[in-house]
Image (spheres, rainbow, N blue to C red):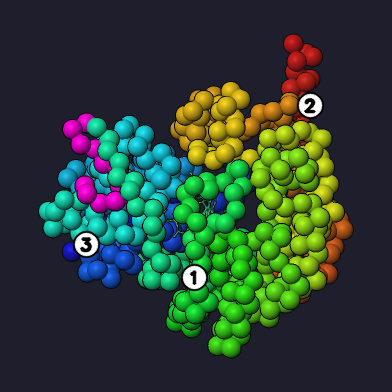
């Protein structure tokens, strides 16, 4: 018998979103580590648990109903980000339709931010869990299953006599090395993939929290930076590489190299134990140096991603990024010199961004010569400094995020752009599309990739990138023709 079922809803709504984000959503399917961590703690404490990863398996609603009725759990837990809010609520309704008596728990970043509001408006949810969910979920499940008083648990939100009650009491999170490894055996392990990777792929987190304070990030979701020790991480890596045959691992820490000593020790352990796998990580431009990168390369690091965001120091300062253009240029150069590929992330439409600074950013992105560039449009997420900034200036209302996730009307499937100094949503979208086009379709870039891409795998990645660029070019030409036709028909009218 299954006592608890945990569900990961799909992370994009079918038929919505722009071409590029839809493409990336399909190319990037990673394990819901948060649920796997929770499942692990429940399992360790004798509670039987299963995970349904709808995002990876694409389970249709009717099938989900059948599975739930067959499993007949007492508790269902759903994870919810702001960007998956609608899918999470749709899933919650299916759960309650299939099993009216089930106890429905929801957790994840969105509940941590807007849990009270969510429980007020969504009666399907019986209990919300804020922040890290391992300890509260275990206590709630234990108490609920034994008929005890689950309402006394710290860090939960629930409803009583029509009122929403919050117990946000405990902000002392668990010692990070004592958290059991995620129960990946409950996940469809062969379903995960990432744009760049080939072979069995998964992701891993070696820390909780973050030491920085970027204005666009849900910083308060974190409870300070806590780092797993290299000895603890290597145990998980050995299990993944030797035990389960993973060949590609993505370290999804916000700043993987925040502590140089820790990563150099981890690299020595990977080499010493002869673990053969390729890995990639995300970090900040001011947190790398040549010796560290050399060790990383020797230990199998093949790609480092950096958030460079903008080439305007004013915009970088508004974003509280804490890096300069010089840091960015140095970092990309060092990564290249270490024989590692670089992925540079840029944002358009941040506070202070004008058409002029956006052009500057695009030019900078090409001058840097990263192996890959990723251009996104700044999205306002509730609870971030940026959200408050936009609200204070009257650009958005308090519940603007709902338009991002819920409305199909005037803002269909579009993120809430920060509109400033003539930077309209249409301008941003066009600029983003053209940036991809003019970055990837440069003959010099293509030639360099063909000459440098020796391995079969790099060529595969290159063809993937080319496919996007050609599709974008097609899209670009199509829009141009459409505009010309429109002009013609207006003249004719
Ligand atoms: C990996 C990752 C992704 C991956 C995939 C997601 C995945 N499969 O996990 C990819 C790259 C696709 C991604 C994309 C995006 N992401 Co992202 N991503 C992350 C990241 C870096 C790690 C997630 C993770 O594994 N964490 C580790 C686990 C242990 O933590 P956790 O998932 O939060 O789970 C814990 C708690 O939340 C809670 N919990 C979670 N679920 C549940 C369920 C129950 C029942 C309970 C009780 C508790 C519970 O308990 C868990 C264990 O402690 C986080 C940042 C972070 N450090 O968490 C951002 C984060 C989740 N992403 C975020 C954002 C904004 C995005 C993007 C919108 C960015 C963008 N502009 O493009 C896109 C959206 C893509 C889309 N589809 O539209 C935000 C979400 C903010 C919000 N309010 O929802 C985060 C929090 C980053 C941040 N600090 O702002 N992302
Ligand atoms: S964007 Fe990254 S470095 Fe900045 S606060 Fe968020 S998690 Fe930390």
Q: Residue at the spot x=50%, y=74% of the render?
A: 229
Between residue 354 and residue 178, name the one nearer to us: 178
Which stretch appears magenta?
151-162
Q: Is residue 104 left or right of residue 239?
A: left
Residue 451 on image: x %, y % = 83, 69
Q: Comparing marks 3 and 1, which lies closer to the viewer?
A: 1
Disc on the earlier residue, 2 or 3 = 3
Q: Please identify the quarter of the rendering in which residue 421 is found.
A: top right
**Cβ of disc 3 within 8 Å of ligand 1?**
no
Pointer 2 local density, CA inside 10 Å: few below 14, some 14–19, many at least 20? few
Is residue 161 highlighted in magenta?
Answer: yes
Q: Which residue is mark 2?
A: 484
On screen, residue 197 above or below 86: below
Q: Which residue is mark 3?
A: 2
Q: Residue at the spot x=62%, y=75% of the render?
A: 261
- Residue 66 makes an appearance in the image: no
Q: Residue at the spot x=74%, y=76% of the render?
A: 291
Q: Which quadrant holds the C terminus?
A: top right
On screen, residue 337 above or below 168: below
Q: Say the numbered circle drawn on residue 228.
A: 1
């Amino acid at each position: 018998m299954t006592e608890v079922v945990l569900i990961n809803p799909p992370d994009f709504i079918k038929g919505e979103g722009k071409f590029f984000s839809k493409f990336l959503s399909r190319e990037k399917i990673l394990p819901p580590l948060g649920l796997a961590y929770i499942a692990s703690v429940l399992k360790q404490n004798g509670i039987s648990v299963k995970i349904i990863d709808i995002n990876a398996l694409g389970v249709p609603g009717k099938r989900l109903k059948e599975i739930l009725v067959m499993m007949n759990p007492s508790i269902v837990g759903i994870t919810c980000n702001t960007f998956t809010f609608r899918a999470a609520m749709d899933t919650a309704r299916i759960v309650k339709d299939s099993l009216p008596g089930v106890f429905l728990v929801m957790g994840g970043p969105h509940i941590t931010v807007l849990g009270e509001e969510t429980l007020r408006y969504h009666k399907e949810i019986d209990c919300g869990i804020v922040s890290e969910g391992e300890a509260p979920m275990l206590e709630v499940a234990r108490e609920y299953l034994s008929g005890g008083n689950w309402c006394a648990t710290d860090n939960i939100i629930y409803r009583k006599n029509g009122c929403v009650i919050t117990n946000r009491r405990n902000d002392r999170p668990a010692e990070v090395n004592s958290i059991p490894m995620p129960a990946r055996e409950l996940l469809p392990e062969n379903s995960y993939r990432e744009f760049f990777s080939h072979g069995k792929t998964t992701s891993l987190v070696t820390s909780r929290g973050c030491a920085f304070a970027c204005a666009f990030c849900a910083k308060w979701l974190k409870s300070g930076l806590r780092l797993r020790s290299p000895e603890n991480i290597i145990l998980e890596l050995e299990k993944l590489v030797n035990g389960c045959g993973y060949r590609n691992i993505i370290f999804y820490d916000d700043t993987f190299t925040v502590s140089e000593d820790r990563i150099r020790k981890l690299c020595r352990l990977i080499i010493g134990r002869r673990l053969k796998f390729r890995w990639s990580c995300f970090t900040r431009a001011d947190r790398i140096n040549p010796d560290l990168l050399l060790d990383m390369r020797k230990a199998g690091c093949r790609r480092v991603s950096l958030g460079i965001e903008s080439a305007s120091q004013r915009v970088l300062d508004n974003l509280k990024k804490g890096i300069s253009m010089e840091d960015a240029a140095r970092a990309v150069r060092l990564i290249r010199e270490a024989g590692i590929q670089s992925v540079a992330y840029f944002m358009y439409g941040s506070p202070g961004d004008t058409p002029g600074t956006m052009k500057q950013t695009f030019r900078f992105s090409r001058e840097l010569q990263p192996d890959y560039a990723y251009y996104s449009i700044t999205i306002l997420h509730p609870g971030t400094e940026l959200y408050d900034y936009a609200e204070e200036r009257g650009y958005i209302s308090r519940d603007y995020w709902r338009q991002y996730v819920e409305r199909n009307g005037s803002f269909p499937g579009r993120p809430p752009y920060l509109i400033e100094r003539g930077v309209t949503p249409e301008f941003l979208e066009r600029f983003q599309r053209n940036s991809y086009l003019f970055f990837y379709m440069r003959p010099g870039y293509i030639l360099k990739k063909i000459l440098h891409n020796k391995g079969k795998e790099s060529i595969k990645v290159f063809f993937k990138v080319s496919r996007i660029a050609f599709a974008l070019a097609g899209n670009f030409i199509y829009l141009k023709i459409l505009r010309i036709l429109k002009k013609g028909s207006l003249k004719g009218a």
